[in-house]
Amino acid sequence: MNNMPSQTVNIREVQTTPFEGQKPGTSGLRKRVKVFQQEHYTENFIQATLSAIPDGPAGATLIVGGDGRYFLKEAIQKIIRLSAGNKVSKLVIGRNGIFSTPAVSNLIRKRKATGGILLTASHNPGGPDNDFGIKFNMSNGGPAPESVTDKIYQITTKISSYKEADIPEVDLSELGTKSFGDLTVEVIDSVDDYVLLMKEIFDFDMLRSFFKKRSSFKVLFDSLHGVTGPYGKRLLVDELGLPASSVMNSEPLEDFGGGHPDPNLTYAHDLVERVEKENIDFGAASDGDGDRNMIIGKGAFVNPSDSVALIAAYADAIPYFKKSGLKGLARSMPTSGALDRVAKKKGVQIFEVPTGWKFFGNLMDAGKCSVCGEESFGTGSDHIREKDGVWAILAWLSIVAYASESNPNVSLNDILNKHYEEYGRNFFSRYDYEEVDSEGANKVMAHLTAFINDKSNIGKKIENYEVALADNFEYKDPIDGSVSKNQGIRIIFKDGSRIVFRLSGTGSQGATVRLYVEKYSAKDYKQDTQTAIQDLIKIALDLSKLVEFTGRKEPTVIT
Ligand code: VG1
Ligand code: CO
């Protein structure tokens, strides 16, 4: 499809009625594929999204792509028809509709686009019986703020029609540009621009020479059949010269091979097993849409809360930060305070924001944050406005290469232990109770709400701990003053230990209760995490009556 002359198109207004529940959650609208497949359902949400663009859809340039999951192709054709119907000027689409979330964020910024539409349910499973999702990102490359997602939702509750152009299925397998009336559709390579960006950030020569010097250093990157396969292959194998066996599950599949594309110790078990069995020095995994990462090594696990702290501590290992300096650091509320200790030492500001990447964007746009992260395997920087899985892997490889200059055979555990020795250790764990009955989950939250509302609990002794603060986290954005309430129940003890409860905003079925606990130890860093936090878990389960209300004796996933 090479620069063919524009075809004229007919635009028609299709009558529709609202669907309930088209409310974007932590990161876009996520529902079962079957829900999106209902007649008008997807069109209604796309129309609402286009209508909610701050300056309107007419004349807009949008970057469009997704993680390759089932229903992606149909959704993109709908976006093309509705975009033409709404007078959008240009769509830039990844070949076959594929783009990782970080790649879209980069392209929005690079092309100075109006925004982007991302088709992904991220770490949720895919396929006809699983999940699909749609998310809108703004011109800064970041997820739409609540003011915009609220507007989208408001429109979905009143929608009576959408505008669609009669465009036959557009072939997205060939690169090039095609026009339909006033709409231009450009199909580009999904990986090229991202590779250029990574080359600006990291020192590829340094990494290559590290791999040459330490030729026995084994790397294994598991894409879990998500979108990062082609990115990983290009960067690790083609650019850095690692053997082809350094990547696994690197073919994006519509159902992620039947797996759960969530890079944690439970769902990335094949990787975890191979790392142990094959003595792999550096193992990594990413999620469906490529914004999350997990870093492990033989006998080593980099807790995501530690990961962001170490990347900040080793900023000198990464040319991008060496050049621009650390402008400030940020983490989501449930994420451990390991990053705060690095901020203190480096003398930079630290921000605590609610869960979800959208809250970091304003800080970055204002030049107040260089590195940020979430406990949920999300790490990133102000090179884009999304968390970035492949970036995090390159950042960690850079840390290893840098640390090996003074300790040639350095391992991930050596690096972690050195950090704990210097800063102490914030033991952190998250317990997920997935797809519990909503009623039970609400009872847990109501019971905890009664606890935090009873001010006589402040100062109360619970076993070895004394309650210092109990509230529902509220955030006032320091840049635009917007306030986000009810962002998670926290019980903070006098020694700084914490228990946090939240309901997930990304699930599509029932409710997921997340329990986060944190305990700091200045010296005794060699303990096992679960042993270190056991007493806090017990307190959390007692206080919340979680087992009684949900009937769940064990969590689904422990991180
Ligand atoms: C989860 C994580 C949160 C993350 C979000 C999107 O949200 O806890 O930290 O930002 O997923 O990640 P929740 O509401 O389910 O706790 V992704 O990679 O799914 O876009
Ligand atoms: Co994701």
Image (cartoon, rainbow, N blue to C red):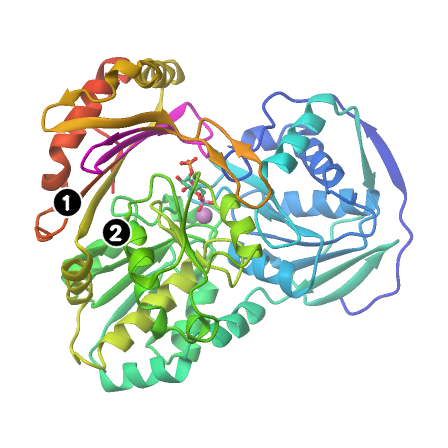
Label 2 element class: loop
Quadrant of the image occupied by residue 536: top left
The three-letter code of the residue at mark 2 reads: Asn
Residue 230 locus on image (x, y percent) = 47, 65
Q: Amino acid at mark 1?
A: Thr
441 sits left or right of 60 in the view: left
Q: Which residue is mark 2?
A: 303
Q: Which sits earlier in the primary sequence, circle 2 or circle 1? A: 2
- Residue 4, image x, y percentages: 84, 66
Q: Residue at x 91, y 52 (%)?
A: 8
Contact between labelled residues 1 and 2, with CB atoms less than 8 Å apart: yes
Identify which residue is drawn at 16% across, 63% down: 413
Q: Is residue 494 magenta?
A: yes
Q: Is residue 516 above or below residue 281?
A: above
Image height of 457 relative to 248, above or below: above
Q: Which residue is mark 1?
A: 529
| Number of residues whose C-alpha sits closer than 10 Å to that of mark 1, classed few (under 14), some (14–19) or many (20 or more) | some
Q: Which label number is shown at residue 549?
A: none
* Mark 2 CB within 8 Å of ligand 1: no
Q: Where on the picture, by quarter, is residue 191? A: bottom right
> Residue 187 at what x, y percent from top left?
68, 63
The magenta region covers 491-516
The image quadrant where one finds ligand 1 is top left
Q: Nearer the viewer, residue 174 or 423?
A: 423
Q: Is residue 50 magenta?
A: no
Q: Is residue 108 above or below residue 189?
A: above
Residue 504 in the image, given as x and y percentages of width and height? 41, 31
In terms of depth relative to the viewer, which is nearer, 335 or 363?
363
- Cα–Cα span, label 2 and label 1: 10 Å
